[in-house]
Amino acid sequence: MGEFDNDQGPVEGQKVSATTLPCAQCGAELEFVPGQAVLKCGHCGHTQNIVVTGGVVEYDLNDAMNRFLGKNAVPPPSGVRQIKCEECSAEIQVADTETTVRCDYCGSRKTVTVEQPHEVLRPESLLPFAFDSKTADEKFRTWMKGLWFRPNALKHRSSVEDLNGLYVPYWTYDSHVAAQWTAQAGYYYYVTEHYTTRVNNQTVHRTRQVRKIRWVWTSGHRRDFFDDWLVCASLQLRNRLAKLVAKIEPFPTKAALPFDMKFLAGFRAERYTVDLKQGWEIARNGIYGEVSARCGRDVPGDTHRFLDVRASYYGQSFKLTLLPIYVMAYRFQNKVFNVLINGATGEVQGQAPLSWVKIMLLVLAILAVCGGGFALYWFVGGGNKAA
C-alpha cells in the first residue's frame, strides 16, 4: 500500500481524458493499438512501444477521506475539453482537436462545451482495450443475430460508426470484514398424520407424512477479505444503464497496468462523477449483502430465519482505475437503444426493440396448437365416452 502524499498520491494533476500524441516521423496522431502495448500512426504506419514501469498502488481509504478528499484540487490539463450532451446530459472529455462530437450514450450531436471542474483524485491504474472496434462490431452483430422477436430491419443496419471505445472510471475497494451473526436454525422432521377421505362414496382412512420444523437459536462469526470490489464511478452509466453495466462485469482487474496517458490515445474517457465517499457507501452496502449471504449459508440445519448480521470493516484500501467499455447508441423508429461491450472480456449486453408482429404470430401459433390438441382430445376421448 502506497504512501498518500501530495507529490505521489492520487491528487489529480492529470485529468482522465482523451489524448493525442504526435508521430515522431510524420507528426500525425498516434493511436493505441488494442491488445498490444503499442502506439501506431494511421498515416505512415510508424509504431512506438508503450513502456510500462512500476506497479499499481492502492491507498488507505480512511486516510484519504479524512485528510485529502475535497482538498488540493488542481486545474485540468490543457489539450482536452469537457462536452455536455443537450439531450441526455452526459458529460465526457474529448481532445481539443475534435470539432464535431457525437454523444456516446444517446447518439446526439447536440453537444456544448462546459467548464472542466477541478478534481482531487487521479486514476492509479488502467485496463487497456483488448480488441479493436472492428472486433467489437463483430461481437455486436453476433449478439444481434442471437436475439429473438426483434424487427428484421434491425439486424441489417450498419453499426461500425456507432461504436465508441470509452474508458470508464471505477473505484476498486479492498476490505477485511469481521461478522458476527445470530439466527434461528430450522431442522426438518416428519410426523405421521391420519386423515379420512371419500372414495366412491365410502370413507377411507389414510396416513401421510407431514414436514415440521424444529427451531433452535444459534450464532457464529466469520472473517472475509474482499479484493477489488468494483463500483462504477460514472453517474451517467449508473443512472441510465446500471443493469447493462452489471451484466458486462466483471473485469479482469488483476491485469490492470499503472496509469499511462498513452493508452488513451485514440479513445475517449470519462471523469468520475461518483466521489470516493459515495463509492465506498455503495461498496459497503454490496459487501454487506454478500457477507450476509455467506453468514446465512453458515447457519446449521435445513433452513433459517431471523438472521441478524453485524459487520465490522477494517484495513480498507482503494484505487481509481479506468476500465474499457465499447458504448453504442443507436436509434430505431425514433427511439434510442444502448449496447455495452466489455472491452477486456468481450461480454455484450444491450437493449433492442421488440417485434410485436413476431410475438403475436407466436401467440397465435401456440393457441392454434393448444386448440388443435383440445379438439383432438375431445374427438378421441370425449367422443368415445359419448359413444
Image (spheres, rainbow, N blue to C red):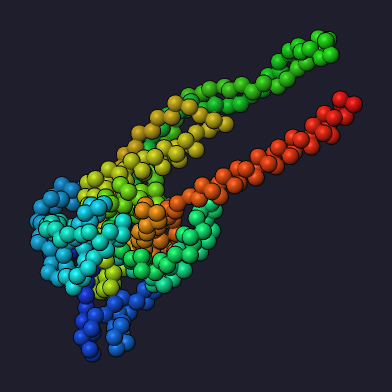
> In terms of image quadrants, where is residue 44?
bottom left
- Report if residue 290 is visible in the image: yes
The residue lying toward the viewer, choosing from 163 and 384, is 384
Q: Position of residue 319 (x, y in %)?
A: 26, 57
Q: Quadrant of the C terminus?
A: top right
- Report if residue 9 is visible in the image: no
For the point 53% across and 61% down, the residue is 145
Horizontal side of 286 relative to 198 (left or right) equals left
Horizontal side of 187 relative to 272 (left or right) equals right
Q: Position of residue 271 (x, y in %)?
A: 22, 58
For the point 31% across and 52% down, the residue is 237
For the point 27% across and 48% down, the residue is 279
Q: Position of residue 275 (x, y in %)?
A: 21, 50
The residue lying toward the viewer, choosing from 53 and 365, is 365
Q: Quadrant of the N terminus?
A: bottom left
The residue lying toward the viewer, choosing from 152 and 310, is 152
